[in-house]
Amino acid sequence: MLLLLLSIIVLHVAVLVLLFVSTIVSQWIVGNGHATDLWQNCSTSSSGNVHHCFSSSPNEWLQSVQATMILSIIFSILSLFLFFCQLFTLTKGGRFYITGIFQILAESNSSQMCSYWD
């Protein structure tokens, strides 16, 4: 049982790290002298120096992707926090329904984000 709880904690932390990295990473699309990510577009020279960076376009789909990424991070943090709270307050054999609901919400937001890029 302890191994199962440890693996769940490791899974929660891994999901949070991956969500933070995928939200913060600065080069989602790279090519032909420019790099684009979720928050800004940068043009680069051939030597790799950044010349101009400006915020991403105000398209509705991009704003919805930004919002779902932030919501996924918030729901994952809440899920991890609630998991620890329920771990120490639930009686033996109790169910982690609230934690599961928040983890499902985080996953549904990130899967919606992935469908925007297809």
Image (cartoon, rainbow, N blue to C red):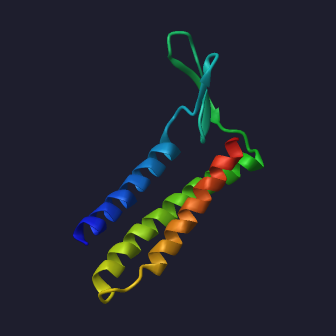
In the displayed structure, would residue 23 be above or below residue 110?
above
Q: Position of residue 26 (x, y in %)?
A: 51, 35
Look at 62% across and 56% down and name the residue there: 68
* Nearer-the-camera pick, 46 or 71: 71
In the displayed structure, would residue 93 be above or below residue 45?
below
Q: Position of residue 116 (x, y in %)?
A: 70, 47
Look at 47% across and 63% down and name the residue there: 76
**Can residue 77 be seen from the camera position used here?**
yes
Image quadrant containing the C terminus? top right
Image quadrant containing the N terminus? bottom left
Find the residue positioned furthest to the top. Answer: 46
Is residue 2 found left or right of 46 in the rendered image? left
Is residue 104 found left or right of 2 in the rendered image? right
Quarter assignment of residue 88: bottom left
In the displayed structure, would residue 43 be above or below residue 71?
above
Quarter assignment of residue 89: bottom left
Is residue 51 found left or right of 19 in the rendered image? right
Total numbered labels? 0
Find the residue positioned furthest to the right. Answer: 60
Look at 33% across and 74% down and name the residue there: 84
Q: Position of residue 113 (x, y in %)?
A: 64, 51
Find the residue positioned furthest to the left. Answer: 2
Is residue 89 found left or right of 61 in the rendered image? left
Q: Position of residue 69 (x, y in %)?
A: 57, 53
Look at 55% across and 10% down and name the residue there: 46
**Can residue 71 be seen from the camera position used here?**
no
